[in-house]
Image: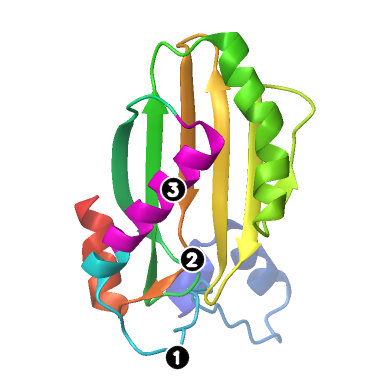
Amino acid sequence: MSDQIDADPFWSVVHRRHPDLDIVLLPPDQTTPADSGQDRDAPEPFAHEHLSVVDDTWARLVGHGMPSSVARWIPGPTSDSVCHSVTLTLGDADEAIALAHLRSAADVLTSQGWRVFLPPTGMPRVMADRPSTLGDEQLLFGYAAKNRNLFLRLNSTGLPVGSQTAYELIEAA
C-alpha cells in the first residue's frame, strides 16, 4: 500500500509531511444498483406485450401512418433488470399536423395516468412518466422539424431477468 501512497501526488506529500498518520487508500466505490428481489420473468413475451402497448399508444396519439420501429433492451432500475425501449418514427410528417398531435397528447396521456411535462423551449416534445411495479414507464413524443420526423419513444418499466441475462440483453442491443 505504501507504493500507492508514494505514487499519488497528493497523498505522497501528506505522508511525507505527517509520517505519524496512517493513510489508507480505499478502492473506488462500486455503486451498482441492488437486485430487485423479484422473481425473474421471460424477456420475449414481455417485449411482445410492450410492442402492443407502444402500438396502442401511437394509435391514440397519432392514429395514422406506418412508422418505422426500433426496439432494444436498456438497463433497468436494478442490476438484475432491463427495460424494453421502442422508438416509432414517422418520416416526412407535416409540421402543422405533427404539432397538433403534440398539443393534444398532454390531455390524452394525463387521462391515462401519465405525469406530463411540456418543456417550454427546444424541440417540440411531450415528456411523460408513470409509476409502475419496478421503476417508471417513460415516454417521449416529439417532432424533429429538420428531418420532419414525428417520433414516439416508450421505455417500459423494469423487468427482472437476472444479472447475467440483463447483461446479455443489453450487450446484444
Q: Is residue 117 left or right of residue 146?
A: right
| Marks 2 and 1, the one that precedes in the sequence | 1
Q: Position of residue 14 (x, y in %)?
A: 69, 69
Disc 3, SS:
helix
Disc 2, SS:
loop
Compared to residue 54, the image places residue 170 above or below, namely: below
Labels 3 & 1 near each other (Cβ < 8 A): no
Q: Position of residue 29 (x, y in %)?
A: 53, 74
Q: What residue is shown with label 1?
A: 37
Q: Is residue 48 magenta?
A: yes
* Residue 123 visible to an observer of this rendering: no
* Residue 57 visible to an observer of this rendering: yes
Going by the numbered disc 1, the residue's amino acid type is Gly
Q: In the image, which is nearer the foreground, mark 3 or mark 1? A: 3
Q: Please provide the residue range marked out in magenta.
A: 47-63
User: Who is closer to the viewer here, 120 or 60?
Assistant: 60
Which residue appears at 65% of the width and 73% of the height?
15
How far is the residue under mark 3 from the one under mark 1? 31 Å
Disc 1, SS:
loop
Q: What residue is shown with label 2?
A: 157
How far is the residue under mark 2 from the one under mark 1? 15 Å
Displayed quadrant of residue 64:
top left
Q: Position of residue 144 (x, y in %)?
A: 53, 18
